[in-house]
Every structure is written in C-alpha cells, then in structure tokens.
Amino acid sequence: MMGRTIFIDPGRCIGCQACVSACRECDSHRGKSMIHLDYPDEGHSVASLPTVCMHCEDPVAPCAEVCPADAILVTADGVVQQADTTRCIGCANCVNACPFGVPKIDLQAKLQMKCNLCYDRTAYGLAPMCATVCPTGALFYGTLEELQTERPGVQVADSFTFGATTVSTGVAMVVPADKVQWPVPGGLPVVEINGVDVSEANANKGGGGRREGLR
Amino acid sequence: MTQAHAGRHERLPLDPSIAPPGTGTFRDAGGIPADRWHADQNGETLVPTHCCFCGVQCGMYLRVDRAGKVFGVEPRNHDINRMRLCPKGINAYQQVNHPDRLTAPLMRRSRDEPFHEASWEEALDFTVSEIRRIQAAYGNDSFGLLGGASLFSEKTYLVGKFARVALKSKHVDYNGRLCMVSAAGANKLAFGIDRAGNPFSDILLTDCLLIAGSNVGECFPVMTQYLWGARDRGASMIVVDPRETAIARTADLHVALKPGTDSAFFNAVLHVVVAEGLADETYLAAHTTGWDEVRETVESYPPARSAQICGVPEEQIVQTARMFAGAERAMAWHARGVEHHSQGVENCLSIINLCTATGNIGRPGAGYGTITGQGNGQGGREHGQKSDLLPGGRSITNPEHRRQICEIWGIEESELPPAGTSMMEMVWQMQREEIRGLIGICNNPFVSLPNYATVKDGYDALQFHAQFDFFLSETATNAHVVFPVTVWAEDEGVMANAEARVVKHNKAQEPPAGVRTDTWVICELAKRLGAGDKFAFPDSRAVFEELRVASAGTVNDYYGITYERLEETGGIAWPCPSTDHPGTPRLFEDGRTYHPDGKIHMQVVEWHPPMDPYSEEYPLSLTTGRTVAHFLSGNQTRRLGALVEQTPRPWVEVHPSHGFRNGDPVRVVTRRGSEVFPALVTEAIRPDTVFVPYHWPVPTAANALTIDALDPRSKIPEYKVCAARIEAAERIDEVPAPPTAPGHLAYPETQVSRTDPLPPTAPQGRGTAERS
C-alpha cells in the first residue's frame, strides 16, 4: 500500500499561494520556492493547481536517470532529492527530462533546485511545509488510509501516461470520484491535426489510459 | 492500485508515534520542547504566538535567532488552525525587522514643512501642548481619538479610558467600525450579547452550511478546512455572494444575488419556510418574542418578488429554504458582504430570523457566526474603544453602567463624557471643524474609509493630527507627529477572535531602539495631561488585570481569564466569570439568551434599496473586497515582497458581456470620482456588477469611489454597493509606491514592477471552475 506521501487535490486549491510562501521558508532553500502554482485553463476557468515534485518511482525519476553528473539521489524511501551541490553542473538535462516540469535551475549558481519533499521534516514523519500550512487541504500529507478517513470516498491516482510511457509517482493526485480514469493522462493530448479530430485515435493507443480523465 | 505499485521502492517504516502528520511540530520531533521558550542547539528559539492579521487568529511560532531577532515562522498545532497558515500569516514575520520601520518620532509644526526626527520628549510635549491649546480654545470635545482593531484588547481598553479620563473627550471610536459592527448590533438586539454563537469547530458537525457575503477562501483561508471538513462529512453548503468565489464554486447552491439585496433574499427564504410549514413553532413559542410580527412581514416577500429584487431565480430561494430548514443542524456564517451596507444590521437580523425560525440556535452544529475581518475586531470594541461602549460592553448611556465604571476608574460620574460619534461621522465633524485635533492609533483611514475626497478634506482641516504606527502609512503622512510604536511581536497581550476565543500573543523580540509600546505612549501622554495616577501601567499585564476587574459581572466577562490560563489552554471563550470556569465556546445551550427575559428578540426587517441610486448614467453595482495576499489598508502587506509579487495592484473584475479583454484599461466611474484599473474578465461575476479590491491608496483606491452612506444603527459604511459605470480608458495609472521607499524587500528576486499594467494571472484565490 502507498506510504506516507503528498496528495494533491486540485478541486480544493484556492490559488492562495500559502504553499509557495511556506516553501520559501524551508531551511534547505530558504528564500526560494520549489512549488509551481499553475493556472491550467486560464481565460476560461479560474482553476489553479499546485505542482510539487511528483517523486517518480517507476521508471525511477527521469531527472535522476538523465543526470550526467549523477547529482540527483533517489533515497531508499522513494524521495527524489534536489541536486547535490558538489556534483551539479547546472546543465538542465533534468529540466528537459521531467515530464511534470518541476526542476528549476539557478543559472548563476549553476545549480538545480527542486522539491525534496522537505526531507528534513518527512524523515521525522512530519508533513512537508507546503502540506502543513495548506489552508484548504489541496496539499495533504499522510497515507491513503488517512486521507480516506478524513475524506470518505476520495479517489486518487499515482500513474500518469505520456504517450506510450506510463510513469508511477510517489506523490498522488486526487481525481473526481465520477471520473476515475487511471492512469491519468499527462502532458497535452493532441486532439486535432489539420482540422481532423484525432482524439479518438489517441484514446486507443498508448498507456492503456483513456484521455478524458482529468481536465 | 496494486498493479501500479509493482516494482516500486518499499518505503522505510516510519514510527507514527514520533509525530503523526498534522500534529506536533518539527522541533517537537527533534526533542526540543516547542511550547516553551527554550533555545535549540543552534540558538534558535520558537516563541508561540498568533498571526497579527485576520479574525481567525491562527497559532504560529516565531523563530528567533541567537541575537534575539525574529527571522522566520514555523507552523503551530494550535486548536484554531491545526498548523495551517495562509500566505499573509507565513509572511507576517517579515514586517518585524523591515527596513521601513519607523524608529524615531517624526514631527513638524505645520504641514508645509517636511518631517524631522524628534526626541520622544519633544514629540510628547508638542502633542500635549496642542491638545491643551485646542481644548482650551474649542472645548474638550474638539479633540478626538481613533483607535484600531489590530491592537491588543489591553490597548483598546487604554484607548477608551484615555479618551474619557485623560483627554476628557467624548470623541473616541475605532476602525472596527468598518468591520463587523453591523453583526454586533444585530446580535445585541436579538440575543443581548455581541459575539458569534458557536465555535469554528461546530462547523464540522453541521448538516447544512450557509455562507453569506463571505469570500472565505481569500479572506479567511484557514477557515476553509472547517468548511470542507463539514463537506467531507456530508454537509450541504449554500453560498450567497454576487461573485463565484472559491467557496461558491464548491457549494451545492450558489445564489449570486445583486449587491445590496440580502435582506430581501433572506426574508423570502423565511417566507418559504413559513409557507411550507418548515418553521420550528415549538422552539419559537418557547424561546422567542416578536415572531408574529416577523412572520407577518415576510408574508410580503414571496419568492417571485424577492427574485426580482435580487436578480436570482425563484427556485434558488425555495431551494435555500428547503436545504436550510430541512437540515437537522444548520449554521449560518456571514461576513462583510452582508454587513457593509446601509442596512447592514437588518441584513444580519434577517439571517438571525432564519436561524431562529428553524430552531438552529445553541446546539452543536447549529447556530450562527460572524467572521471577523480584523484580528481583534471582536475584542477591540468589548472594552470601551467604541464611542458608545464602556469596558465590559457596558453602555455609556446606562446610568448604572456609568456608575460602575467611574467607580473602577476613580472619577466622578459627571466627569465621564457622553457617547460620541462614529468614525465616519468624526471625519464629517473634522470637515465642519467641530473636531480640530486628532490622535490616530494604528489605523489608516486614507485607504480604509469610503469617499477618499471627503476623508482627505476632513484630515486636512485638522489643526493638529498625531498618528501611532510602525510604518509611515498614507494617513501618517498627513500628521504633525508620528509616534513609532511596536509591532505585535514586540509586546504581549490578548485578542478575541471571531469565535470570541481570547488568545494570547507573546513577545518574541525587543523593539528596535527608539520604538515604544502603544501602552507606554498612551500612559506618557496621560501623565502629561495630569492623569498619570490613573495610567500607572508598566506593561500589558497590568492593564489586563484592570480590564479583568472592569469586565467582571458584565456580559463580556473576562474575570476568569488570566495570562497563565491562556498559555495553558490555547484560548478561552468569554464569558468566563471565574478562574475555574472553562469559558463559553457555544452560547445559549441552556436555551436562554442574555436578555433579561432569556428570549431571542426577533426583529422585523424590511428591505430598502442601497443609498446610491442606479440611473442611466450609473447602471452597475460596484462592490469591493479583499484579495488573499493583502490585509485591509495594505500598510503592512504592501511592503512584503512575496505578497506584492502575488498581487501587485488592484484590478476591476468585469463580466465578458461588457466586451473587454483581460488587461484592457477600464475606467470605473461613480458619483465620487473615477479611476482606471486593468480588466479581469470573468464569468464569475454578475453582468450588472463590477468588483475592485480595496487595499491600495489613490490613484488606484476603490475607496475613492465608494459611498460614505452609513447604516443608521451600526454606522458602518456601505462599502459593498454603490452605483457605477465602466468605460474604456486609454491607459492604466501607475500603482503608487508606499509613502516611503520600499527599502530592501525580504526577497529582492520576487520584487516586481509596480507599474505592471496586467491584472493577476488568474482571479486571486479562485479554484477550479467546473462549468460543464
């Protein structure tokens, strides 16, 4: 069963950026936030969504796999650490490899920085700063059982398809109970080519997931 | 899920006994006591205290370094917020050692001169000589005092006592007048007590939650955990708001009524409750007076009529009645959207009538509450800072109450001034030169009061103006003397949050050299005015001890609350008459109110239109409110880099039907003036309504446009509705910088251009809109 991790519930996000501010307070990267607050459907809806590192597990973190300097450590408990300052060369390979757009590069310092699941806290069994403060519970830290105890009937997914590739992650996403499609499609689906609707064709290939899951 | 987990790493077993998620703190886990002021091995100390901002009063630790300076924040597992914090709370600590802090008194003899730094002696003596000069020439009441609801209750007690005993003036009021006085007035009329009926935790127990005029997601983000906690347990939710806020989006029913029509709506809901036989007649017969009159009045508010007034479908009125009255336990929470009206008290009473008629009073999960905007909006008026109140919520017009307080203060009853006027009325009196001198304490009326032109005119007419503040606010730039005082983290004291839970703030660092506590300044002024013997308070604790005694035996009884008990318990709700009393989190559990007859006095409410009439020239409603990143007049939050970056400037929210695109310059025109804002085009607002957040000064001040009409009973201004029109403009005015240079912001890399013409990337604090 899924261990203690972050669950992201976009339905509860109010875009308040408490997570962004809290992340800045972390001692490991004080002053810099490792959270992206995304507005996925800007202009049409007022949706917002916090993106933390998804701590990819299977295949093992693409950022770590492509790192030429072997600077990104994946710990035995599944946490993908930020780059080791003594090894990172700031090449940004990890930025390009990450399917979720998470790592950031400090160009001046030639250093990659990313969410390390507040390892200084989670190692003690505590919630990361972002999930601790999140006033709405859009970021929740705990086990799936703890989440389901608090929110009966909640459905989550921790696999995402990108074309033919499925990525399983340590961090999970809450999905609407009536729209559980799993794995959840990642990236932007191609729905039209030269005016031809190809969404049906896309839905039938790759990953085994259907495309109309999360919107 | 299992197939997806094949091949993944096994997680290291973690011992949940160390600290379950959401409980304890980082330092607890590290073996360092978190609730005491012990430094860890790095010299870091965690001081338990509360946020300085809204009426939720989240618990937090301030991180203090080896040199005794506040440098960070750590979540605290306090009952109220259970570790959660909003962006304002997380960034609040940055104002403590902010470079904009005032560290010496500023002084000038006339407004034509620039400020110069003065000694404390010089500034205090000049102030007292001006008080004496003005009072000798024009009478004691020609000098006024305006306090603030960000002050600890001890300081608000001192403000009220100083005005009446040292200044001997009737003119004292406070900026809580702009916050929740309508709810206070309504609660007093109906229940004989001025506070919310239930604690926040009751929200988790309810079956139906009605949120009226409250953008909880942005204004009180930490409260959403209670709302959604109730939803998780199956409660239904009705949101009444002209805008589709983050909370409205998640509701079972969102009633997007036209601003200024709340009482017409709630009267119609009660009409349906009566018509469908959903009223709790047994409860009404046993516990209320006035029900017959109320029932008769709501007869003339059939859904068809109110639907037309409110601009909502008739079915929504019926549905609200059935959901609320049909629930076993229902609660109503409201905030400024209902209260900021020329009929604010009536709006609140119409909601109380609904709760009462359905028997939803005084039970776990059933009741009412008002969500206070300012940290001490509740406590700020309880001990005599409001023009018509004496300590303990006593009435200044009640001879017995006057006698009691004069005895405690050691003055003759004839020396105690009568009731004064409200904050906005005092400004009008300044315009008329009836008030010629003023001391303002931690308030910023140049941004927070409506109709800026009038406010500026009134303050400019003052012969002498002194202001207490820790940053040079827009209002302080008008003053003759500015006293640099402490921020909340440099003193100790109590605040009462929206639940009437009294919490204690602790001192985390020494104030900078040259800075004094408000208590010290008030007592020094009193000493120089010849009342030193009545103001011999060395610190907040001494004031609190007198406050406890002064409140004993009143409805607002604090006698049983001590600093020690507050530190042990994490807060006690008043009334608390003795030191072994547990406090009163939920009112009326015994079925009795605080009226002598123990009944709920239901009040007849008739809807009337807003004070600013619509016309062909001004066909739209302008409504105002907050954003998640800023607090009130923005004097504090507009200086914090992360919050400025998050919301650098105001905007005008308009419906797509007006034909604007995002970012277009739009001129908003009212009868008071016009200003240009970037458009934020959204379907989340009514086509006949526009919204502007109010945290900024001119030339982008929502309150340059709002009307200074007042509720006749609570004297709260009608911020939430005035007639307006919008038109295309050529360019967007610059956002003004704060009165002083912003200095070094905490996070220089997050500082953004203040002339950025674009609105925020998305409506602030909004969640996903599911429109399908």
Image (tube, coloured by chain):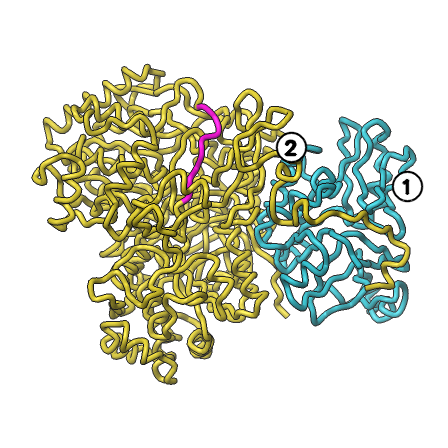
The residue under the point 70% across, 72% down is A178
Q: Which residues are magenta?
A: B503-510
The answer to whether one can see residue A57 in this image is yes
Q: Identify the main secondary structure in magenta.
A: loop
The answer to whether one can see residue B671 in this image is no
The residue under the point 33% across, 50% down is B576
Quadrant in which residue B25 is drawn: top right
Kindly indicate which chain is depicted in cyan in the rendered structure. A
Query: Of helix, strand and loop, which one carries label 2?
Result: loop
Q: Colour of chain B?
A: yellow
Task: Check residue B24 for magenta coloring.
Answer: no
The residue under the point 28% across, 72% down is B287
On the image, numbered disc 1 is attached to which residue?
A66
Front in this rendered view, residue A43 or B566: B566
**Is B726 situated left or right of B85 in this image?**
left
Q: Position of residue B299 (x, y in %)?
A: 29, 80
The residue under the point 24% across, 25% down is B525
